[in-house]
Image: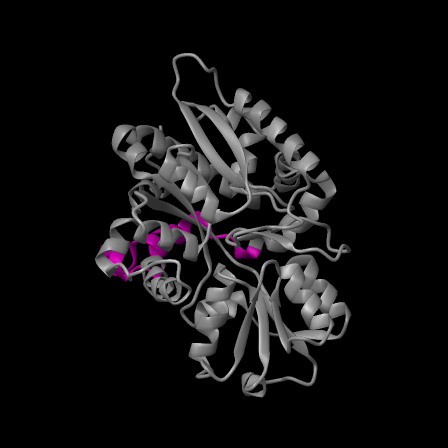
Amino acid sequence: MTRPTTSPDAPSTRARRLAPSRPGRCAGAVLAAVAGIAMTMGALAGPASAEPTLTVGYFTGLIAEPETVIGSTPSLAADVPAHIKWVPITAGVTALAEVSAGALDIVAGVGNPPTVAAIANGTNVDVIWDQSLDSDSLIVAKSITSPDQLIGKTIGDLEGSSEDYEVHGWLSAEHLAGKVTVVGFQSEQAAAAAWLAGKVTAAYVEGALELNLVAHGGVPLTNAKKIADLGYPGLDVLAVTHKLIVSDPALVQAYVCTELTATNDLFGPDQDAYFRSSAGLLGVAPGQAVAATKQYLSYYFLPNQEKAELEGANGSTLSSPTVQAYIKTATFDKAQGRITSVPSAATLASHVDPTFALNAVAGHCS
């Protein structure tokens, strides 16, 4: 997923989960402050003695997420039998590299390209919960009303990201692959600036940037939800090291059960309180967290959707929307040079484990 890092009236991008660099995500002072808060919240998660340490990577930004709800609610964090250490992260690629190195046990919100690339490159990580979809829109001038009008034109997006995957998938679905040039930028802010300068015909952006381009006369031609319906979803997931699943499945189950509760809290009657309490871990003002999260809520998966997303039809993980999206993403990753060969569908399916989500949804939580 991608999380906005500035308020809607500021011309900056939501923090992208997949780009190799995130200029504008957090200034050094802000990141240091968030890290300090994260350590404090980790201390609240449970006593250090007699309990294992669970290191969880989460994205900062404007939007409250299950991890920030857990981290800012001591009574909820206490449901996880571990000392939770919350670690702010800025990119899915580097976060999954930290998983491979043993520095993180769980990463929240990582998207398709880095997850699939990590699997293909040997990182033993499993997807155990689908959190949300991306929320970008393809902004064009009002004179462009159909995809065919983009033939011979250019689209700007975030290079190598889930959003980049979505744009390429949309072009394929519209039979425009090879007929439209996709220009990858190092940030969505740069893609938006290129659209404003007339250097690209369309820009695939979200949050504050989308609002800014619309204010300058742009209109959405399509969006991430519609592209997901075409079979190219940008999925933000909860991934855990397989080593932890083997060594302490009860801990993983407890965390997923708490993830379910926190997800429900995002939609519950006290949601504003949870959004506000999340602001400390997010590194933003409480009012910003409330406004931005409410705008994003419809992109989250509800717990009762987890079975269909992870397990698929007839109990076959291979047929699940998540694995099917990863199969397509693997081809994208290879074309981008992230991986040297495409892993088999069976290999990708083996790294999607719906067990913990299904147990939690069924109420099998202590």
Who's the residue at 52% across and 31% down the image? 86
Q: 5 or 249, which lies in front?
A: 5
Position of residue 31 relative to residue 163, above or below, is: above
Residue 212 lies left or right of residue 355; in this view the side is right
254 drawn magenta: no
Return the residue found at the far top.
49
Who's the residue at 64% across and 36% down the image? 31
> Where is residue 252 drawn, in percent x and y?
35, 33
Q: Is residue 35 visible?
A: yes
Image quadrant occupied by the C terminus: top left
> Where is residue 189 drawn, in percent x and y?
67, 60
Q: How is the image coloured?
A: one colour
> Where is residue 63 drawn, in percent x and y?
61, 46
Q: Main secondary structure of the magenta part?
A: helix
Q: Residue 102 is drawn in which quadrant?
A: top left
How many marks do you count on the picture? Answer: 0
> Where is residue 28 drawn, in percent x and y?
67, 37
Position of residue 93 relative to residue 230, above or below, is: above
305 drawn magenta: yes
State the extent of the magenta-drawn residues as a range.
Answer: 298-321
